[in-house]
Amino acid sequence: MRAFKWSVGTLFLCALCTVSTPAQQPSEHQVKAAFLFNFANFVQWPPDALTDTTTLTIGILGDDPFGNAFKPFERRKIKGHPLRIVHSTRLQELPTCHVLFISNSEEKHLEKIFQHLRDRPVLTVSESAKFARSGGMINFVLQDKKVRFEINLQQTREAKLKLSSKLLKLAIVIDDAEEDQD
Amino acid sequence: MIRFRDISIKRKLTAIIMFSSSIALLLSCAALATYDWISSEQALVRRIGTMAEIIGFNSTAALAFDNAQDASETLSALRVEPHVMAACIYDNANNIFAIYQRETQPFTPPQTVTDGNQFIDNYLHLYRAIELDGQRIGSVYLLADLGEMQERLRRYAGIVALAVMIASLAAFLVGSRLRDQISTPLLDLASKMRIVSSEKDYGVRAEKYSKDELGDLIDGFNAMLAQIQDRDADIRYARDELENKAGELQVELAERRRIEAQISASLGEKEVLLKEIHHRVKNNLQVISSLLDLQANNIADARTVEMFRDSQNRVTSMGLIHERLYQASDLARIDFSEYIEELSKNLFYSYSGDAENIEISTAADEIFLDVDTSIPCGLIINELVSNSLKYAFPNGKGGHINIELQKDADTQLLLVVRDDGVGLPEGMDFRTTKSLGLKLVSTLVRQLKGKLQLSSGGSGAEFKISFPTNA
């Protein structure tokens, strides 16, 4: 470890300040909202799922834990696509999403939801402990009070989503195939 | 202290060669070094800039997902680049997100982000924006050391110094050969010039080494010497010629002087001789006159005596001329006015018995006449005056006889003999007269190529004779 003039603690402190102003600590869900937004930058959808004119849709299924955490992103574009954030407690009511955040309230219906989304290019994200190991793609976890995420590559491959290596580098990768071998 | 312009050409050329080659080398090396410095600066900026871009690109996810550790790992790849001393990644709010540092010495990351490149104190400060999907999400800062470049510049300076020294040495060695090409002919020329000026030997010639301006100079110098020699020869020839001419002239002059002396001697002899002749002629004429006189004394006939006297007077009038001639300084001419005076006196005494009451007056300009003119002219006066004395004043009558001689025009003389006597007998024509005297006058006037004009009346007679003179 090199001797920085600035202590590591200070660095972490600063690192936490990326999304919000340094004076105000961002809440966990504000960070997660930003992450959801940013995932779209590192994921490549099949061309027919995301044409040039398509609006990029982020869906929230079940109870909405974000509040107004998406407000900073509402009028922004991702890769040239307009951004739309939709929320519903019922899967059928949601339009075709590119990113779908499944709230903890839907934990019991995961099987059904996965069935419904099978082979469709929808990036599923959740924050429940076993999500990534039970058919989900990305799952938020907390490490040292910092938001990190697990990625199940098997699932993303099946959904024909290509994830950037930069994203994978930051993720805790869960590969079903590898686990099978173990 | 010797000034540069006073040192010898040899040294001057050496100095010029070495100085200019060193300057050229220094300048070109400086230009190369500058170019090298600038291009390595640009290369460094390109390299470090590329590195910053790569780091920025690889840090987008770390920034997006707030993973400072990952950013630090990305930065730590800079280990392979020894010139990067430190690096930083800033987040969107310009807070330090990740940091990298090569040395253990303290490093304070800049608090403000200024996009672009800055060279400050041998360090390159380079900032690049980190963008994700067109949005700026942070910045990367790299601090690069220019030590390598400086090291290279120092090596450059060392090489240049060495090269300048070697080049100077080479220039000295090569230049001394080249220099001799110029200095040898010049020195040779200078020594030849000294010989010419000190020994006045215009026969020396400078050796020509080349066909350039120096060759021309030497040709010119030699041509000048040749010209001087030619001119010297010309002058010598002309002087000899002059001396010869002068010698000849002197000989000639001596000859002339001798001839002149001879001539003047012979002239003197001739003058003496001429005087002697005139003297003898005069004496002989005098003798003739005396003989006539003696003869006349024995004659009873008055008319014959008169004829003798006339002849005696004629001879005397001629004798007077010869007397005048040998007495005068000029043997060829006589002062005729004086002659007329004397002649008239002589006639007057000759006829003194008959002419007591007669006055003779003369009025003559100062006129010189030669022998050929004097003799007829004198005889004419003698005849006319005798005539007047004998016939113009009969019975002891008194009167005047007037003799005038004057210049009539440039080459004409006018002789007038006039009396206020009884005049000539009427109807007498002097051209047909039987009088010897007047016949003589007529003949003599013709001899003088002159004209005779006669006017005669109760108040006397007047003869006007105009004749040309060559005097």
Image: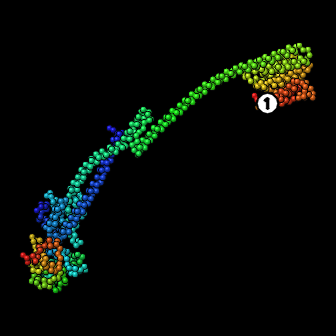
On screen, B136 above or below A115? above
On screen, B372 above or below B77? above
Residue B374 on image: x %, y %: 79, 24
Q: Front-most of A143 and B421?
A: B421
- Give the chain of mark 1: B
Is residue B388 among what the camera can see?
no
The N terminus of chain B, quarter of image:
top left
Quarter residue A106 falls in:
bottom left
Q: Is residue A154 left or right of residue B467?
A: left
Decide: few, some or many residues near mark 1? Use Cα within 10 Å; few <14, some 14-19, many ≥20: some
Quarter residue B466 falls in:
top right
The residue at the far right in this view is B426
Is residue B383 among what the camera can see?
yes
Residue B306 on image: x %, y %: 89, 18
Q: Front-most of B279 and B337?
A: B279
Q: Circle 1 sits on which residue?
A: B468
Residue B327 on image: x %, y %: 74, 19
Kindly identify the residue that appears in the image at 87 percent across and 24 percent down: B437
Residue B63 on image: x %, y %: 17, 69
Kindly identify the residue that appears in the image at 23 percent across and 54 percent down: B152
